[in-house]
Image: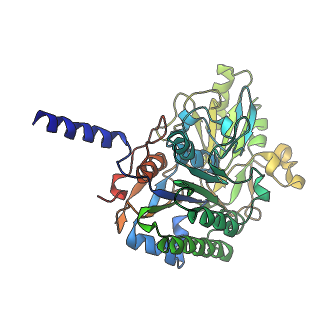
């Protein structure tokens, strides 16, 4: 009797820790469509996504981390760690030793935590990372059994070719097929930014993404190992309409604030060299008078800012309020960059950018999607709120492997079949 109680307690502890359930590993495909806003799916026909809602588990309340932009959230999804632990704190930031980080996919920038594909490899499982964060290390090369070419973003193939590679790996024999396949797809992100969420271009991009998803689901349906394959589809952030850009360089110049701004999406990280407390305090006081943005101070961040206090995190963060956004001056059209020194503090910019993201996670429009379907997934279940850090341990549970070391998230129990 005592041994029975001991075994029950031991099993309960294993489940609570997110350890892998027993049984042969599954094949799990993780697709990340950039900028997949729930409002798009609500407004247009999406038969593949609709099928997952009926037959699997889903949420239109995927909660990103702050800032709600691409790289920080993609790394959070893949590692299951808060940014304060994995070290990618925005799309752009300064590092004292490495210099300026700018949308870099090199795994060597990370300061901790394991990507899903690395955790799988460590446990003797085959993995694939296709155009996915952490696929390559400049020091150690490819980080998975199968990796896509390490080429700049503008030279990557279109989504249809990326899906063809996913399908090629999926139909490999059992002895060769990866147990985990992660793929990044552009999805509707670019069309939403340039044309707007309600544009025909965004609708076309969504419909094309749904068609690719349908192709993958049909291939899984026809697969001899159908009962050992699961599919997870997510995004890195939502999207909302914007109107005007915060001319942060002009504002800093006006108040004679000696800070270097590094801006992306809707935030500007303000670095001071040297970090003089008196100058930082003066800057905070001067900037706090603007109603168009909030000033977040290291040491007094709101609970939803999980960036930590490391040297990559600046003393002050300017966080724009909708419908304002902030981008580094070098990303402005060259013929407009003179406005950084001489232009107005806020510039109407809908002619160049119609929608963006980066606001605090609870801001309307920042939530994304999360869908799961296939072996080991519950049927017809609305999951409610899904945190970015919980995707890694949930996928690990589906694969039947242990999560990475360390991990901050926990498995989404409601997603899992009994």
Q: Using the image, determine if residue 27 lies above or below residue 277.
A: below
Q: Quadrant of the C terminus?
A: bottom left
The vertical placement of 348 against 87, above or below, is below
Q: Is residue 121 visible?
A: yes
Q: Which quarter of the picture shows residue 87?
A: top right
Front residue of 257/317: it is 317
Name the quadrant of the N terminus: top left
Percent coordinates x, y for residue 127 in the rendering: 57, 50
From where the camera sits, is residue 289 visible? no
Is 257 situated left or right of 120 in this image?
right
In the displayed structure, 153 sits above or below 319; it is below
Residue 233 position in % (x across, y down): 51, 61
**Does residue 184 lie above or below 121 as drawn?**
below
Residue 356 location in percent, x, y? 64, 58
Left or right of 242 on screen, residue 361: left
> Is residue 171 or residue 71 the one in the foreground?
171
């Amino acid at each position: 009797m005592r041994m029975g109680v001991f075994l029950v307690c031991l099993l309960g502890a294993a489940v609570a820790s997110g350890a892998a359930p027993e049984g042969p590993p599954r094949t799990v495909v993780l697709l990340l469509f950039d900028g997949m806003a729930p409002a798009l799916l609500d407004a247009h026909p999406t038969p593949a996504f609709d099928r997952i809602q009926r037959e699997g588990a889903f949420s239109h309340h995927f909660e990103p981390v702050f800032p709600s932009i691409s790289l920080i959230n993609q790394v959070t999804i893949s590692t299951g760690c808060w940014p304060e632990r994995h070290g990618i704190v925005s799309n752009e930031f300064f590092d004292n030793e490495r210099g300026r980080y700018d949308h870099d996919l090199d795994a060597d920038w990370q300061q901790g935590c394991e990507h899903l594909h690395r955790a799988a490899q460590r446990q003797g499982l085959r993995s694939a990372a296709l155009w996915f964060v952490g696929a390559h290390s400049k020091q150690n090369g490819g980080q998975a059994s199968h990796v896509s070419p390490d080429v700049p973003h503008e030279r990557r193939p279109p989504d249809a070719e990326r899906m063809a590679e996913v399908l090629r790996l999926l139909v490999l024999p059992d002895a060769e097929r990866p147990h985990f396949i992660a793929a990044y797809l552009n999805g509707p992100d670019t069309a939403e930014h340039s044309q707007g969420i309600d544009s025909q271009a965004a609708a076309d991009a969504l419909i094309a993404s749904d068609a690719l998803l349908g192709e993958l689901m049909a291939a899984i349906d026809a697969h001899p190992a159908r009962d050992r394959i699961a599919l997870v589809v997510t995004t890195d952030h939502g999207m909302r309409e914007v109107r005007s850009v915060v001319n942060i360089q002009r504002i800093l110049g006006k108040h004679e604030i000696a800070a270097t701004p590094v801006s992306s999406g809707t935030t500007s990280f303000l670095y001071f060299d040297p970090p003089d407390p008196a100058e930082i305090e003066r800057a905070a006081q001067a900037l706090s008078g603007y109603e168009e943005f909030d000033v977040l101070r290291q040491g007094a961040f709101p609970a939803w800012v999980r960036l930590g206090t490391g040297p990559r995190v600046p003393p002050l963060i300017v966080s724009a309020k909708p419908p304002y956004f902030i981008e580094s001056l070098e990303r402005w059209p060259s013929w407009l960059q003179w406005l950084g020194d001489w232009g107005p503090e806020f510039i109407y910019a809908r002619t160049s950018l119609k929608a963006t993201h980066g606001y605090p996670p609870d801001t309307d429009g920042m939530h994304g999607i999360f869908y799961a379907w296939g072996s080991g997934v519950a049927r017809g279940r609305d999951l409610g709120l899904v945190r970015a850090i919980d995707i890694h341990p949930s996928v690990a549970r589906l694969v039947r492997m242990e999560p990475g070391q360390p991990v901050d998230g926990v498995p989404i129990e409601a997603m899992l079949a009994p």
